Image: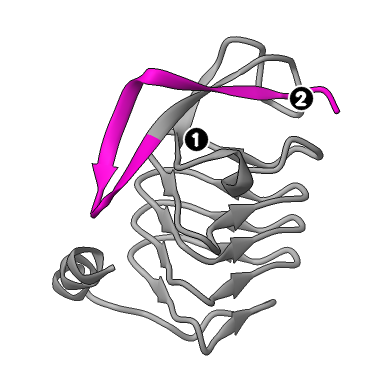
């Protein structure tokens, strides 16, 4: 399998007790061009090398269940500890908690929390304020 991105060992952040690494595209796919910098992932299990899945901006995907696959896209300052797949888009200040799923053609933006007991396909029920978002990010 040909890899579509690499982890940049010298560009990393702490996410709680985990380390996440910025990614760089190794080939063109979708609207991503070879050499483009992406967001941050903990390891290759967090972002599929197949399809057009991508993590952009300063978004972070980590944890044992955090995964972006298919043609899923994560951007902005989103944090993903659950699954984003199919044609789903997660952006802005969204938190996808461990055990949560965002799939289909769902778009989740603004300052929302998708919790593990919810399936965001095709609508989303979890909405929070900016203050609740800060608390959620501190506890994840």
> Residue at position x 66%, y 11% from top?
34
**Farthest residue in the right direction?**
1
Q: Residue at x 53, y 58 (%)?
A: 66
Q: Give the residue drawn at x 43%, y 71%.
A: 97
Q: Is 42 on the left or on the right of 139, as rendered?
A: right
Residue closest to the eye, 74 or 9: 9
SS at badge 1: loop
Left or right: residue 139 compared with residue 115: left
Give the extent of the magenta segment.
1-20
* Of callouts 1 and 2, the N-terminal one: 2
Neighbours of disc 2 within 10 Å: few (<14), some (14-19), many (20+): some
Magenta span contains residue 12:
yes
Q: Which mark is residue 56?
A: 1
Residue 99 position within the rendered picture, expressed as x and y whole percent measured from the top left: 53, 77
* Cβ–Cβ under 8 Å for marks 1 and 2: no
Seen at 46% across and 72% down, the residue is 98
Q: Report if residue 23 lies within the magenta region.
A: no
Q: SS of the residue at dot 2?
A: loop
Whole-percent x, y for residue 122 in the image: 69, 77
Mark 1, other Cα within 10 Å: few <14 / some 14–19 / many ≥20: many
- Return the residue at label 2: 29
Picture quadrant of residue 28: top right
Q: Which mark is residue 48?
A: none
Please state the horizontal and vertical placement of residue 18, each as a whole percent of the image: 32, 48
Dominant secondary structure of the magenta stretch? strand
In the rendered structure, the answer to whether residue 49 lies left or right of residue 81 reads right
For the N terminus, give its image quadrant.
Answer: top right
Residue 87: x and y in percent read 74, 55
Q: Residue furthest top?
A: 35
**Distance from the alpha carbon under mark 1 to that under mark 2:** 13 Å
Q: Quadrant of residue 42?
A: top left
Quarter of the image where the C terminus is located = bottom left
């Amino acid at each position: 399998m040909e890899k579509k991105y690499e982890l940049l060992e010298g560009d990393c952040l702490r996410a709680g007790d985990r380390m996440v690494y910025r990614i760089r595209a190794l080939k063109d796919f979708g609207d991503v061009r070879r050499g483009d910098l992406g967001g941050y992932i903990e390891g290759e299990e967090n972002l599929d090398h197949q399809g057009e899945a991508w993590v952009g901006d300063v978004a972070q995907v980590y944890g044992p269940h955090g995964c972006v696959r298919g043609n899923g896209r994560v951007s902005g300052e989103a944090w993903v500890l659950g699954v984003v797949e199919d044609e789903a888009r997660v952006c802005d200040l969204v938190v996808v908690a461990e055990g949560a799923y965002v799939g289909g053609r769902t778009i989740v933006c603004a300052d929302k929390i998708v919790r593990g007991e919810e399936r965001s396909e095709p609508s989303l029920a979890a909405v929070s304020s900016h203050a609740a978002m800060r608390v959620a990010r501190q506890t994840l």
